[in-house]
Structure formats: structure tokens, C-alpha cells
Image (cartoon, rainbow, N blue to C red):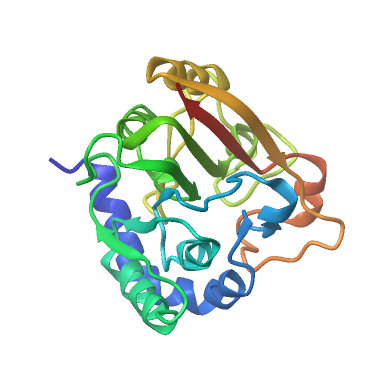
């Protein structure tokens, strides 16, 4: 049974997909192998490592710009997964345009109940995907289920600090939310319903599902940073404090 936040987020992304891709799609396509709103290159961060011969799942792919680019790096299989039919329509167009050089499977389903068998993938990753819009307890459990032993879970999402400093419009220099008990953020019913939990809870979730943390990369806006995500955070704020972070956890 779908949860209320799944229904809400699906309706939001289906309605917003065309506008989202019109605003952000060109930038994502121009720098597909890059992380976060500042598009910090994978070549600089080395989050995923060598994907050659691997089975890779993009866990909330949008228009699958990441998956399409990764398919050219020699993986055995790349699957772009998303809840939104509207976003996947854009993904199908991108996959079709790249068919000569990239083969990407596309699947629509809920992030907390994927249709994949146990231990189907070597890498599960997302850049503000399922791990941002689903309950962390369920999302981590599902990612762990579909990962093979030794597999990598890597995801970029908003930091606790960004949420704590958000006044309902954008991050400020002051705290506006409680840290203890943080989990679900619903800004007056507008936009998406997002999730984030305290650092200790993330670590306990990973360990409960047989994963060990390899790294936590706190992203800093480059000195010359520009972004199409102007409503998310401004560069001056993100030069002083991390608005995004990337977790890397390995299944034992």
C-alpha cells in the first residue's frame, strides 16, 4: 500500500516533470556524471569508482541523465528507476536518443517496494533520488536487499544543517527546526515531502542492514559556483556550510 508521501511526491513529480526538465535538464545533460546542485564532477569525488562489469541501479533517476552517461563506462547493466511517469517519459526520450552508445533499462515503481530480486545489483546510487523522498528506514532496507555482498550504496541528499536552517523559504544563518526527532519535512503542502534523520540514526540504519560506512562527503560550493537550483540554496551559504552530502556504505 502506498504511503501518503509516496502519493504526494508522485503527483508532484508527474505535474512538475516538464517544467523541471525545461529548467534543469540541459545542465544535467551537460554534466551528467556530477553530483548535487553544483554539479561537482564524479572524476573529482570518485564516489562510484569503476563500474565496468557491474550491475548498477540509479535509485530515483528522473530523466536518467546519470544512467545514460554511466552506460558508456562499461557496466554489465544499468537500470534507471523512478516513481514518476512524467520523469520517466523524459528518460525514455534520452535513452532513445543515446541508443547507439548507451543501453539503459527503465522501471517505474515505488522506491520502498522495488520489483527486483534479492542481491541483484553491485551499485545502488542516487543524486537526490529515493533516499531523499522516502522514509530512510524503508529506503535503506530496500537498497540493502537488492545489493549483493560487497555492493555499494551511495547517495547525495540535503544535509541536516540545511533542513535545520530552512525557514520555509530557504536556508538562513539561523536554526529554525529541531534536530532531535527530525525526519519528515513538508513545507505547507507545496513541493515535495522530503526526509532526513540525525547522523546517528543513519549510521544505525546502515549497520542494522549489514552495511559499513566508507565515507561521508560534505559538498562545498566551488568559488565560481553557479546553479539552476537557485531556490535550493545560494552559493554564499553553501561556501560556509554544507547544503548537500554524499554517504557511501558497503554491504558486508
Tell which residue pokes out farthest to the left in this image. Answer: 1
Q: Residue at x 39, y 53 (%)?
A: 60
The answer to whether any part of residue 135 appears in the image is no
Q: Is residue 20 above or below residue 233?
A: below
The correct choice, above or below, for 226 with respect to 101 in the image is above
96, 103: nearer the viewer? 103
* Quarter of the figure that contains the N terminus: top left
163, 226: nearer the viewer? 226
Foreground residue among 103 and 156 = 103
Position of residue 94 measured from the top left corner of the image (x, y, whole percent): 42, 77
Q: Position of residue 49 (x, y in %)?
A: 61, 46
Q: Quadrant of residue 225?
A: bottom right
Side of 122 where 164 appears, left or right: right
**Residue 142 seen from this side:** yes
| Quarter of the rendering containing residue 161 | top right
Image x and y of residue 210, in percent: 41, 19
Closest to the observer: 252 or 237?
252
Q: Is residue 81 above or below residue 141?
A: below
| 197 relative to 139 in the view: left or right | right
Identified at 68% across, 36% down, the residue is 217
Amino acid at each position: 500500500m502506498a504511503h501518503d508521501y509516496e502519493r504526494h511526491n508522485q503527483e508532484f513529480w508527474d505535474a512538475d516533470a516538464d517544467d523541471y526538465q525545461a529548467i534543469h535538464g540541459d545542465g544535467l545533460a551537460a554534466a551528467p556524471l556530477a553530483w548535487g546542485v553544483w554539479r561537482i564532477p564524479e572524476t573529482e569525488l570518485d564516489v562510484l569508482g569503476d563500474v565496468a562489469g557491474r550491475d548498477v541501479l540509479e535509485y530515483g533517476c528522473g530523466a536518467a541523465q546519470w544512467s545514460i552517461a554511466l552506460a558508456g563506462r562499461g557496466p554489465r547493466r544499468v537500470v534507471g528507476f523512478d516513481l514518476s511517469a512524467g520523469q520517466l517519459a523524459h528518460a525514455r526520450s534520452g535513452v532513445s536518443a543515446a541508443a547507439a552508445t548507451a543501453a539503459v533499462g527503465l522501471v517505474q515503481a515505488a522506491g520502498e517496494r522495488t520489483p527486483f530480486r534479492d542481491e541483484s545489483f553491485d551499485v545502488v546510487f542516487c543524486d537526490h533520488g529515493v533516499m531523499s523522498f522516502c522514509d530512510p528506514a524503508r529506503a535503506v532496507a530496500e537498497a540493502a536487499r537488492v545489493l549483493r555482498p560487497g555492493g555499494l550504496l551511495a547517495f547525495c541528499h540535503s544535509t541536516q544543517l540545511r533542513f535545520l536552517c530552512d525557514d520555509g523559504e530557504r536556508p538562513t544563518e539561523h536554526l529554525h527546526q529541531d534536530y532531535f526527532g527530525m525526519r519528515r519535512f513538508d513545507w505547507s503542502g507545496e513541493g515535495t515531502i522530503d526526509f532526513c534523520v540525525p547522523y546517528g540514526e543513519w549510521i544505525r540504519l546502515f549497520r542494522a542492514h549489514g552495511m559499513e560506512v566508507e565515507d561521508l562527503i560534505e559538498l562545498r560550493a566551488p568559488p565560481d559556483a553557479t546553479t539552476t537550483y537557485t531556490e535550493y540554496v545560494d552559493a554564499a551559504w553553501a561556501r560556509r556550510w554544507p547544503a548537500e552530502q554524499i554517504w557511501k556504505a558497503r554491504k558486508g
